[in-house]
Structure formats: structure tokens, C-alpha cells
Image: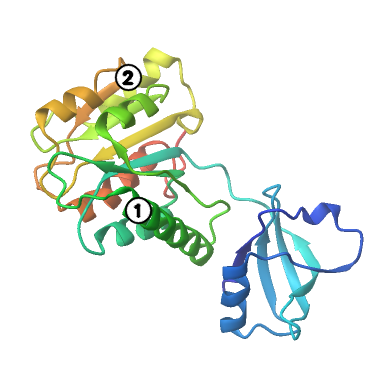
Amino acid sequence: MSLHHFFLDDQVIAEETQAEFALRLAADDRKHAKVLRLGAGEHISVVDAARDYFECEIVSADSGDIVVRIAQRLEAPADEPNVILVQGLAKGDKMDDIVRHATEIGIAGFVPLSCSRSVVKLDEKRKASKTQRWRAIAKSAAMQSGRLSVPEVCDPMTVSQAAAFLKNATAVLVCWEECPATSTIAGAFASAFAECGVVDPRDARIAVVVGPEGGLSAEEVDTLTEGSRAWPVTLGPSILRTETAGVVAPALVMYECGGMGNGKR
């Protein structure tokens, strides 16, 4: 049975001097722990501010604080590919679902992208509110899926802002339905890694761009692929919904880089 999973933002467990100590959980995590009705004798997994990974036994949780002792230090899973999802703003709850599912598969970062064909238009107030919500969803999904880190969720960007943000990436893969069938993810990787001298794909920083419901315009694709290591790529013959492509595309990229249980280097 998997353990309930928590993150510590400002506490390093190795620095604790007592055998039993209180976890300094964020306010929302304290509420979550209370809902779970965690009690003495139960075990939880904890990732601290140093990204060390522990299994802890709860000593008490009666006062609102969770007091624990270390049961064992856990081996962290092997490093996963550093994949950032740049996702065109989608309507309704689609963005929530994309953030949640992409976090579960292991993306390292999430950039909401405002495109010319985006149905959703966010003013500054709504941008702040939505970003806060997406960060909370990413943290919740990371806790649920046992990730060792929470993906960074950036403020929404325009296409030109995203292009500048991604200029130092090892490869930028822009998913575009108008690409020829020969413009594959594997082919783009081969070109990017050869140019950068990358031997282990896990050392690379890959950005995957997915458009909104109406797709990316040709002008936007041109802007996003101006760099020497940026390519438009196809996801196959089917036209995928944005909420589908937003999960399938990073999953394919992670697989190609040796993640998702692939194991290749």
C-alpha cells in the first residue's frame, strides 16, 4: 500500500536534533492531513526542503501538529527527464486536468500559453487567480502520485514571451497538426542532441509546446521555432484534443528520454 505523501518547504529533516519532532507542514497540507485522520502508528512519506526522502512514523497528531520519528531514509527514484509543458490556454476545467495529469507523469514545469486562437482570455486578476489554482493542483497531484518534487507553474505567457523563456532549452518541440509525417519527436531529438553533444537524454531540458483548442497559427509556430534547436513535430495522423495532446506529448517525450519506465539511456 502506498504511503500518504507530504512536502516540506522550509524544514530539513537531517537537521532535526530530537528523535521525535513536529513536521512544519504548510497550512493546506495541515488541513489535508486532518481530513485524512492520520493517527499514531501510521506511516507517511516525506520529501524535505533538501529533497531528501523519508518514511516517517507518526507519534501523535492530536494537537494539530504531526509529530513523527524517522522510520527509514528512502532511496529516491532515478532522475527523470527535465520536460516542460508549454500548454495553450484551454477553456473550462481542461487546464486543471492537464496540469493534474501532466504532473502525475512527471513534468518538471508548466507554462500556460496565451495564443491568438485561445478561447480563454485572462486579465491580470484572473491570471493570478488561475496560476494560484494550477500551483495548488500541481502540488496536490505530486502528493497523490508520490513525486519527489512539485513542478514549477509559471505565470501565463504570450507566445513571444515563451519563445524568449525557452531560448536556452536543449530542444523545443512544437506540436503542430500541419507537420509532415516525417517531422517526428525522435528525429528532432537526434538533431538537438547531436548539436548540443548530449549523450544522456536525462541531462537535457526539453520543452513541449501544445496549442489551444483552435491550434497554433503558422505565425506562432514560426516564432516558437526561431531557435536553432526548435522544431515543429507531429503526434501522428490523428488530430488530438488539446487536453489529450497536453498529456500524450510530454509522455512521449519522457519515454524517448528514458522516463515512463523506458529505462533507455
Residue 125 % position (x, y)? 35, 53
Q: Earlier in the sequence, mark 2 or mark 1?
A: 1
Q: Nearer the viewer, residue 113 or 233?
A: 113
> Is 91 on the left-hand or right-hand side of 163?
left
Secondary structure, mark 1, is helix
Name the residue at 42% across, 45% down: 262
Q: Does residue 180 appear in the picture of this structure? A: no
Side (left or right) of 219 relative to 64: left
Where does label 1 land, which residue? 125
Front position among marks 2 and 1: 1
Give coordinates of residue 114: x percent, y percent. 24, 42
* Residue located at (58% from left, 44% from top): 78
Q: Position of residue 97 (x, y in %)?
A: 31, 61
Above/below status of 5 relative to 113 = below
Q: In this view, does 219 lie above or below 194?
A: below
- The answer to whether residue 167 is seen in the rendering is yes
Left or right placement of residue 174 versus residue 76 in this view: left
Describe the element under mark 2 as helix, strand or loop.
loop
Residue 229, disc? 2
Query: How packed is label 1: few (under 14 Cα within 10 Å), some, or many (20 or more)?
Result: few
